[in-house]
Image (cartoon, rainbow, N blue to C red):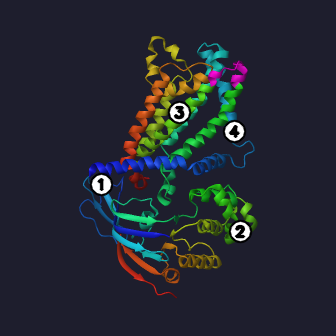
Amino acid sequence: MGYVRADNVVVQFPIYGAAGGSFRRTFIRAATGGTLSRDEAQRVVVKALDGVSLELKPGERLGLSGHNGSGKTTLLRVLAGTYEPISGTVEVRGQVISMLSVTLGMDAEATGRENIFLRGAILGLRRRETEKLVEEIAEFAELGDYLEMPLRSYSSGMSMRLAFAVSMAVPSDVVLMDEWLSVGDQEFAAKAEARLKRMGEDGHIMVLATHDASLIARTCTRVIRLEHGRIADDRPIASA
Amino acid sequence: MADAARAGRVTLAVRDILRAVASVHVWHLMGWQEVRQRYRRSTLGPFWMTISMGVLVAGMGPLYGRLFNQNISEYFPFLAVGIIVWQLIFNLIQESAQVFIGAEQYIKQVRMPLTLHVLRMVWRNTIVFAHNMVVVVLVLAFFLPTYSPVALLALPGLAVLLVNAIWLGILLGTLCARFRDFPPLIAMLASVAFFLTPVMWRKEQLGQHTWAAEINPIYHFMEVVRAPLLGQLPAPLSWPVVCLVTVVGFAATVALFARYRSRIAYWV
């Protein structure tokens, strides 16, 4: 069973190559993005997350909303374990699958089937383990004979189907997604949504960052709105 | 307190390296994939590397043998083996610079040990080297038909060379991720090193100045692979130097990696 807990997480990036002539005196508060400031060494830094705390229990499906640059992707990366916060703690138990990009690790010249193995390896699977999943993946992605064709012959929606199907087939406890379901046709989007809902009901934890409020309303049990790296609003969603 | 935090960071750095090594199935597949990707839809595939290396050696051997006034049957195998081992070292150094920068998407999106990206680079170059070894085998079969068991000593030599590529990849990869002037600097130094390392010329040609070759650690790494393949024992100094570099290299790298490992994702 998965479990996610973040305690007062702060993430701050130095922005190299921005000597910062134009905003030497004041940092004008922008409508979007994290707060810009300077650190002790006088480097420009952006505070992408500023004291974020949250706890997710099995079955929770969290929607992250907020402006561009409000910290959604950064928070997903922190939960995925790729960004280590400069202060605060993160605890994530269980197998985490981050589906943050469709094309990551995919080879356009390799066939759909070969790409299943590549993607599987990146997610930590051994060849034998992936072999057992191929059929299920092929069925869910509905690609038929295209599975034996090189990926460059796929449309972007088809690649997305394949990537999504692989990520869904890999055993996981926590699923992280960034603006995913916006790709693909309606029929597949509906199928994917249904799958995500079912996973939540099976006890998976899901975190989905999106600008699509109705998608959150349909698939999530809770919504958090981020603003300048802070949680501006956190409320449950009554199940439809 | 500060000591405990530092010890924790060192543990995390060492764990990163060990976990990466244990994920053989991942870097093995990714390394092969990257070689294949380069030659997809070509009939000869990766053997293009073998052929271009063969052509290079066949062209340079007689020319430089004449220029340096060398006995061709001795110089040709020396040059062939030297160039191929040098190519491996050069590629490892050169690609170390990009090892984290080029893996940006992975580093930001999927949690995997950072060292894994180094291992897949080292493995990819090992595969390339294996293809080039075909040329070595052909040249040796022609010029040095008598088989000497000394040649087997090239295996531990190659192993220690590849192990050193791991720390070098982490070290240069980290520096290059942070300071973007490092990749071109490294490329420049690596090219210069070709002329300063005895690849085309022999150490003995320096006369009383052989120290100029011996202070160069790359020479000793070349030696532990090249000399056995040519049926000779490496210079007595080579193995001790190589072992020392391995220990010092890993110690320095772990210290740096412990300090900055968690920042790399923010730098790339």
Q: Is residue B196 visible?
A: no
Q: Is residue A134 visible?
A: yes
Whole-number angstrom distance, CA of label 2 to CA of label 4: 34 Å
Q: Which residue shows up at 40% across the image and 69% down it? A: A5
Judge left or right: residue B206 versus residue A194.
left
- Indicate the chain on which mark 3 is placed: B
- Establish whether labels 1 and 4 are both on one chain: no
**Residue wearing tag 2:** A143
What is the secondary structure assignment of the residue under circle 2?
Answer: loop
- Indicate the chain on which mark 2 is placed: A
- Indicate the chain on which mark 4 is placed: B
Task: Name the mark nearer the viewer: 4 or 3.
Answer: 3
Whole-number angstrom distance, CA of label 1 to CA of label 2: 50 Å
Closer to us: B234 or A75: B234
Span shown in magenta: B139-151
**Residue wearing tag 4:** B48
**Residue wearing tag 1:** A43
- Indicate the chain on which mark 1 is placed: A
Q: Which kind of residue does numbered mark 1 sit on? A: Arg
Whole-number angstrom distance, CA of label 1 to CA of label 4: 48 Å
**Residue wearing tag 3:** B161
Q: Which residue shows up at 59% across the image and 18% down it? A: B232
Closer to us: A200 or B31: A200
Q: Which residue shows up at 34% across the image and 62% down it? A: A46
Q: Which kind of residue does numbered mark 2 sit on? A: Leu
Judge left or right: residue B67 versus residue B219.
right
Is residue B144 a member of the stretch shown in magenta?
yes
Task: Name the mark nearer the viewer: 2 or 4.
Answer: 2
Q: Which kind of residue does numbered mark 4 sit on? A: Trp
Residue A28 image point, x, y percent: 28, 68
